[in-house]
Amino acid sequence: MRLAVCAEMVFTDLPFVERVRRISEAGFDVELWDARDKDIQALKATGAVFSSMTGYSSGSLVDADTADDVVRTAEALIPTALELGVSRMVVHPAELVQGHAARPVYRSSGRMWATGARTLEKLGRLGGKHGVTFCLENLNTVLDHPGIPLARAKDTLMLVEAAGHPNAKLMLDLYHAQLGEGNLIELVRAALPYIGEIQVADVPGRCEPGTGEINYAAVALALADAGYEGTVGLEAWAKDDSDAALEAFRSAFTVYAGEKR
């Protein structure tokens, strides 16, 4: 497994480029959110490997009136992704504005399902043309993202299955899944063929592994047993010290050969 760290949430007292440099020097790949406000040349100069970034800037995947905006803005961001060497572009079931639902919806419909699958298939075809993968991230509606329809991991998994394109995958966020559904080890086993990347944080608090209730060492072992060789990203706040948070993450997801069953 490759390990990545979201630069938006650690070393927050430092300028963004310095955060990226610190993460890279510690041996991790780097995740980004919105790249439009970033100095792309300065980021490239750090020599970091960039794992993922937000892959759209407006529209809702499941809203027939705005789904085309998702595809249009995704296409506009592809040149930035290619310049940074990003291979995974993250989308959400519905539009977020500063982390909140742009237009809260509390019931899903068959039309939303059909629109979401169709839009995700379009994104897959777009990604296939440019060599990137669009990853649909599950979200929790219990605490962080109320009003986002089709946000549960089981919903996003079904949308990816329905889209049926190799360049449309899951960004399986286990923090969100724990809050909304639990049963994480069975979830990763079921979702394994469709996972583009996994993100982690502990519950409660959304900090590094070891600060909450999730047994991430067991999750890591289950992933290793299942043969997962993709990326696991720390999308978490540092509870106290960012360097310590990165090392706790590394420790939780370092699985030795003798530990595999």
Image (cartoon, helix red, strand yellow):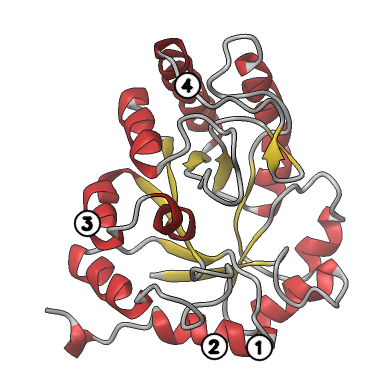
Q: Earlier in the sequence, mark 3 or mark 4?
A: 4
- Rounded to the nearest angstrom, the CA distance separating label 3 from label 1 is 31 Å
Q: Which secondary structure, mark 4?
A: helix
Task: Mark 1 and mark 2 in contact? Answer it, CB < 8 Å.
Answer: yes
The relative height of residue 179 versus residue 14 in the rendered view (above or below) is above
Amino acid marked by disc 4: Gly
Mark 3 or mark 1: which comes first in sequence? 3
Q: Nearer the viewer, residue 104 or 222?
A: 104
Q: Earlier in the sequence, mark 4 or mark 1?
A: 4
Cα–Cα gap, marks 3 and 4: 25 Å
Label 1 SS: helix
Question: Callout 2, which amino acid?
Answer: Glu
Which x, y percent locates residue 68?
Answer: 63, 15
Disc ID at residue 186: 3
Residue 101, image quadrant? top right
Residue 147 image offset from top left, x and y in percent: 59, 33
Instruction: Calculate the distance from the C-alpha at mark 2 to the C-alpha at mark 4.
Output: 38 Å
SS category of the residue bearing label 2: helix
Give the percent coordinates (x, y) of residue 160: 37, 32
Separation of residues labelled 4 and 1 (CA atoms): 39 Å
Numbered tag placed on residue 243 in the rendering: 1
Q: Nearer the viewer, residue 220 or 179?
A: 179
Q: Looking at numbered disc 3 in the image, what kind of residue is underneath it?
A: Glu
The residue carrying mark 2 is: 247
* Amino acid at pointer 1: Asp
The picture quadrant where one finds residue 245 is bottom right
Q: CA distance from mark 3 to mark 2?
A: 26 Å
Residue 84 visible in this rendered orientation of the protein: yes
| Tag of residue 116 | 4
Q: Residue at x 51, y 47 (%)?
A: 140
**Circle 3 SS class:** helix
